[in-house]
Image (cartoon, rainbow, N blue to C red):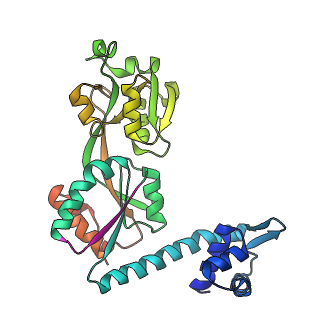
Amino acid sequence: MNLKQLEAFVRIAELKSFSKAAKYLYLTQPTVSAHIASLEKELGEALFIRDTKGVELSEAGRELYAYAEQMLVIEKKIQEHFEYRKRGKSVLHIAASTIPSQYLLPEIMARFRERWPEEQLKVTETDSAGVVDELLSRRADIGFTGTVLDDHRCIYIPFYEDELVVITPGTEPFLSLQGSDPEKWIRKEPVILREEGSGTRREAGRLLAEAGVALEDLNIVASIQNQETIKRSVGNGMGISILSALAAEEEIRSGRLLAFPLRREGGKRNINLVFEKEFPLMPAAGRFIDVMENMYPGIRACCRKDSFV
């Protein structure tokens, strides 16, 4: 088994065609077929189901694909890493959910660039579930999430305390509700939430449940990924929402939106640094965490000293 065979396998799986995969890889179709035949012989399994409509992965093929795709990602990262090393640089891949990506990472990255100007950063913004997927598929070296997912393969290190608030239009009747507890009236209002997989949505559900309100009790009229769209929709009277106070700070200060504490004691949640438990951190990740330690004391103490290669 070699990487060329696995690359041919992955491309066929994605393009659902031997001929298209051969064209993509600049190989002849007999060469691609030979790669798959060798793989199938070595593994003792048929990897594809062939019919007149094309090819589909067999059960064994689906199992192999999960590993093969990760190996190709790692191969690409190795090539990229050493290409940058030739130029005296390295590249750190970061996956972050919306709030840390837009409101915390910019300052951290600026501090990092001051100290390590030769390093390059690549940031993928996704939801919290997507961050974990990026880490486990090895497409990202470190991640940032606004919630802790039930996945024992990752380590979560809290470093910033965020607050979720109920946001409403800055109009009557909401002006008259100031000082009241949202859990008493939130069921009566149309609610706009972040999308499934969002840390904000997950944490909002947890905090509401602690206040005796289930998400299923709410009149959810829309699920929207983009928080700017959510804020504008709330401002236009479409409904109310639950967002990070960081995300709505400007609109709250201007009075365009009102903010209500989520629960009497507030809607606190942690923003977390995340990395894969069984995969060593790259030196660039260690340098990034060094910078974070200066900004958020104690974070390095939570990281394993033997995590860095």
Q: Which residue is more in the foreground, 122 or 199?
A: 122
Q: Which residue is more in the foreground, 34 or 59?
A: 34
Q: Position of residue 237 (x, y in %)?
A: 41, 22
Locate the N terminus by quadrant.
bottom right
- Bounds of the magenta segment: 116-125
Residue drawn at 49 percent across, 25 percent down? 218
Furthest residue toward right: 52
Q: Position of residue 299 (x, y in %)?
A: 22, 59
Based on the picture, tell me whether residue 124 belongs to the magenta stretch. Answer: yes
Quarter of the image holding residue 259?
Answer: top left
Q: Which residue is more in the foreground, 91 or 23?
A: 23
Tell me if 132 is positioned left or right of 243 in this view: right
Q: Is residue 182 visible?
A: yes
Q: Position of residue 107 (x, y in %)?
A: 21, 55
Residue drawn at 16 percent across, 56 percent down? 295
* Secondary structure that dominates the magenta span: strand
Quarter of the image holding residue 263?
Answer: top left
Tell me if 114 is positioned left or right of 165 in this view: left
Q: Is residue 297 visible?
A: no
Tell me if 205 is positioned left or right of 293 in this view: right
**Count of numbered tags:** 0
Q: Position of residue 150 (x, y in %)?
A: 46, 51
Relative to 68, is 235 above or below? above
Residue drawn at 34 percent across, 28 percent down? 166
Relative to 31, is 134 above or below? above
Locate the C terminus by quadrant.
bottom left
Based on the picture, tell me whether residue 135 belongs to the magenta stretch. Answer: no
